[in-house]
Image: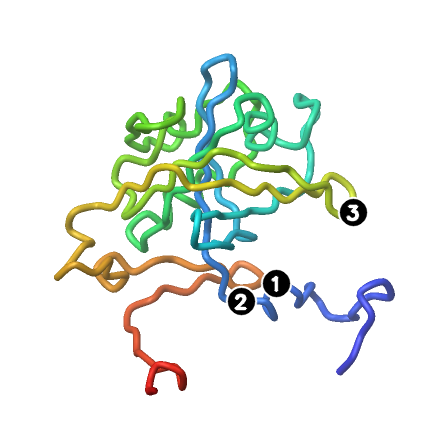
């Protein structure tokens, strides 16, 4: 099968996000200048650089009660900071609850019953029980093709790791089983890993 996205795929559902999968989920927490917290999951998310450590996520769509994108994007443009919380399997239902559309004044931490703590380096809340949280300073917001589509880049300036996830000096993903996004309404969970040695490492 071959199709051009501009001409449609003819399938019951768009296969694009199923093709590009699995994708890590960035559970992004922000706080507006008005002091209100927001929490929402983004599946177009990833790390993009080591030194300094940097991440990105893409936000799509807009809201009638926001002048610029949705709550997350508006808050980041106001404050210049955000926090990425890693989603474990145990938090799948809480994460899903925060994907609901709420008015801008609703605090998703409270609406979903999620414990939160203050970040160390930025004025923002974070998911208290997350396996890891990345405190970020926004470096740029890039306008993408399409209506209300933006990529947000940030430098990681503070990293939280839950103590029980660090085993023998390694951040062990099997200890919390990270959740990833597939296509449609599907998700996957990492329960086991294997290692490969790069050819250059053998020399």
68 or 61: nearer the viewer: 68
38 or 10: nearer the viewer: 38
Q: Quadrant of the N terminus?
A: bottom right
Residue found at x 48% / y 54%: 49
Given this view, does label 1 or label 3 mark the residue nearer the observer?
3
Q: CA distance from mark 1 to mark 2?
A: 7 Å
Q: CA distance from mark 1 to mark 3?
A: 16 Å
Q: Of helix, strand and loop, which one carries label 1?
A: helix
49 or 186: nearer the viewer: 49
Residue found at x 27% / y 48%: 131
* Apparent side of residue 187 relative to residue 93 in the rendered image (left or right): right
Q: Quadrant of the C terminus?
A: bottom left
Residue 202: x %, y % from top left: 33, 86
Residue 54: x %, y % from top left: 48, 47
Residue at far top of view: 34
Count how many numbered circles sit on residues in the image. Answer: 3
Contact between marks 1 and 2 (CB within 8 A): the answer is yes
| Lower sequence index among marks 1 and 3 | 1
| Lower sequence index among marks 2 and 3 | 2
Q: Which residue is mark 1?
A: 17
Callout 2 crowding tier (Cα within 10 Å): few <14, some 14–19, many ≥20? some
Q: Which residue is mark 2?
A: 21
Callout 3 crowding tier (Cα within 10 Å): few <14, some 14–19, many ≥20? few
Residue found at x 71% / y 67%: 12
Q: Which mark is residue 146?
A: 3
Q: Of helix, strand and loop, which one carries label 3?
A: loop
Quarter holding residue 148 = top right
Q: CA distance from mark 2 to mark 3?
A: 21 Å
Residue at far left of view: 168
Asked if residue 22 is positioned above or below residue 137 in the image, the reply reads below
Residue found at x 41% / y 44%: 95
């Amino acid at each position: 099968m071959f199709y051009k996205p501009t001409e449609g795929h003819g399938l019951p559902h768009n296969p694009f996000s199923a093709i590009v999968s699995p994708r890590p989920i960035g559970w992004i927490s922000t706080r507006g200048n008005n002091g209100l917290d927001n929490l929402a999951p983004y599946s177009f998310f990833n790390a993009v650089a080591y030194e300094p450590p940097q991440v990105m996520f893409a936000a799509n769509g807009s809201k009638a009660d926001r002048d610029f994108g949705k709550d997350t994007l508006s808050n980041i443009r106001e404050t210049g900071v955000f926090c990425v919380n890693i989603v474990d399997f145990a938090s799948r239902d809480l994460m899903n609850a925060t994907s609901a559309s709420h008015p801008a004044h609703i605090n998703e931490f409270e609406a979903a019953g999620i414990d939160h703590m203050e970040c160390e380096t930025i004025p923002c809340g974070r998911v208290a029980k997350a396996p890891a949280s990345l405190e970020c300073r926004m470096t740029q917001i890039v306008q993408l093709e399409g209506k209300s589509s933006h990529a947000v880049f940030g430098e990681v300036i503070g990293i939280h790791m839950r103590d029980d996830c660090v085993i023998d000096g390694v951040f062990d993903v099997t200890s919390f089983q990270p959740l990833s996004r597939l296509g449609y309404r599907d998700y996957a969970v990492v329960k086991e890993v294997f290692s490969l040695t790069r050819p250059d490492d053998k020399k």
